[in-house]
Amino acid sequence: MKDIISEELSSMNSIDKAKHYKQIYKELKLILDSTYDEIVIADGEGVILRVSKSCHKVFGIPEEEMIGKSAKELEQKGILSKSTAVYVSQHKEKVTLIQTTRAGRRLMVTGIPMFDDSGNLIRIISISRDITEIENLKKQLNETEEMLDWYRKEIFKQHTKDKNIIIGKSAPINEIMKLVHQIASVDITVLITGDTGVGKGVLARLIHSVSNRRDKPFIQVNCGAIPESLLESELFGYVEGAFTGANKGGKKGLFEAAEEGTLFLDEIGEIPLHLQVKLLHAIEERIFYKLGSSKPIKFNARIISATNRNLDVLVSEGKFREDLFYRLNVVPIHIPPLRERKEDIPILSNYFLEKFNAKYSVSKKISSEAYNFFMSNTWHGNIRELENTIERLILTTTDEIIRSENIENLLKGNVLIRIADDNIMPLKQAKEAVEKKILNNALKKYKTTRKMAEVLEVDQSTVVKKLNKYNIRV
């Protein structure tokens, strides 16, 4: 191309050459003035030779005041910063940098060197893109994100204001609440662990209530309280004719009932191995099958599970599938027992005191000695035991003040119906009192209805019925 242009110029006379150069200048000027980008042309020393018309707007000085000035001088006067022409004249290489101008604009500038046939630097072409508006939009976006984050935190506080009191406000609970805030809007699988009565179900409901699914169903199932023979049909449902005695028209399962909401699988460690396979498939594939049907049903529900058992041990013993454990244990949350966070006991005690005072239309108070007794007790039943104890104290104490001896007698069982040699009562009442006492003792020791049934030598369904009869919560 260069040889062709040289040949054309050599064949022209001086007048034609002048016209040719004038035409080239016009074309170059038109390009400079028409481009959306700012273009500055300097010689090899960085002296400005030409600028595009838009440079006036971004640099804040007229075109004629820039031409003939060195880029170094413009830098020193603060008209622009970090000149590409200065850099290229010194290093003889292409460069891209961010430049700030006197007019308050932010530019992304690329400086390109141009060399002659001998390798001498003869021109520096600087092409600028005004990124001021882009950066302003980025700043506004960041500010909006910060505002949204603040609103999310405030909404979270409002949602948790009346709910986290039932769990506590100790350092471990505060850490749990922070984690709940982080995962609130993310549909991630959560495994809650902790002793019986620490508030696993309450925490599961809290996670649901602050999530994006808060307006959808929260379905809870105690996997240890449902007989093994019925658990699969309860979880997945069944179609008409699936088995003898099946309802006409079939039945919707809990997976289907929890659609778009949250499915809380409590006591997940009690699910039998053959059902663990189906549960794993449902969670991984997001589909399930009703009993008696080969038609897959898609489901969209968040899975939260809980257990008071050590699933690691169950996995090592071959009683719980390792792949299901890892699928459920994406975000583990462990709630410490009440004895390890005793600073929560006064807060919880006051909460339950107010709750049951309002429920039974009384105005009882707890003495300072009684608070000390509460603090010294081990509370093997954790929050649930504390709640039940305060409710019974409010119902059974005659004074307005609940004292330490009231609590001590209650915990020893002196307020419960007791059968003594000299105590005569109807046989039905005596039988129920004994049953209730034995069921409570068995539940504290063995935790699940399956194990209770084994020890008490009755069917699991019998244990479940008895627990429901006496309103004993598993």
Image: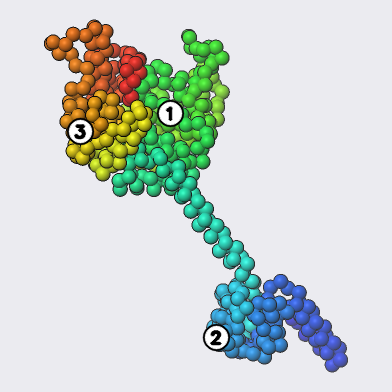
Whether residue 12 is visible to the viewer of this picture, yes or no, is no
Q: CA distance from mark 1 to mark 3?
A: 37 Å
Indicate the colouring scheme: rainbow
Could you tell me residue 249's position as x and y percent?
Answer: 56, 14
Give the mark nearest the N terminus, 3 or 2.
Answer: 2
Direction left: furthest residue: 421
Single out the mark in the foreground, 1 or 2.
1
Quarter of the figure with residue 122: bottom right
Direction bottom: furthest residue: 14
Q: Which residue is mark 1?
A: 220
**Disc 1, SS:** strand
Q: Which residue is mark 2?
A: 90
Q: CA distance from mark 1 to mark 2?
A: 72 Å
Disc 3 marks a residue whose amino acid type is: Arg
Q: Residue at x 24, y 26 (%)?
A: 398
109 or 44, which lies in front? 109
At label 1, counting other C-alpha atoms closer than 10 Å, the crowd grade (few under 14, some 14-19, many 20 or more) is some
Whether residue 339 is visible to the viewer of this picture, yes or no, is yes
- Disc 3 and disc 2 in contact, CB within 8 angstroms: no
Single out the mark in the foreground, 1 or 3.
3
Disc 2 marks a residue whose amino acid type is: Gln
Q: Residue at x 28, y 31 (%)?
A: 390
214 or 124, which lies in front? 214
Give the mark nearest the N terminus, 1 or 3.
Answer: 1
**Disc 3, SS:** loop
Q: Which residue is mark 3?
A: 403
Direction from residue 178 to residue 369 in the image, left or right? left
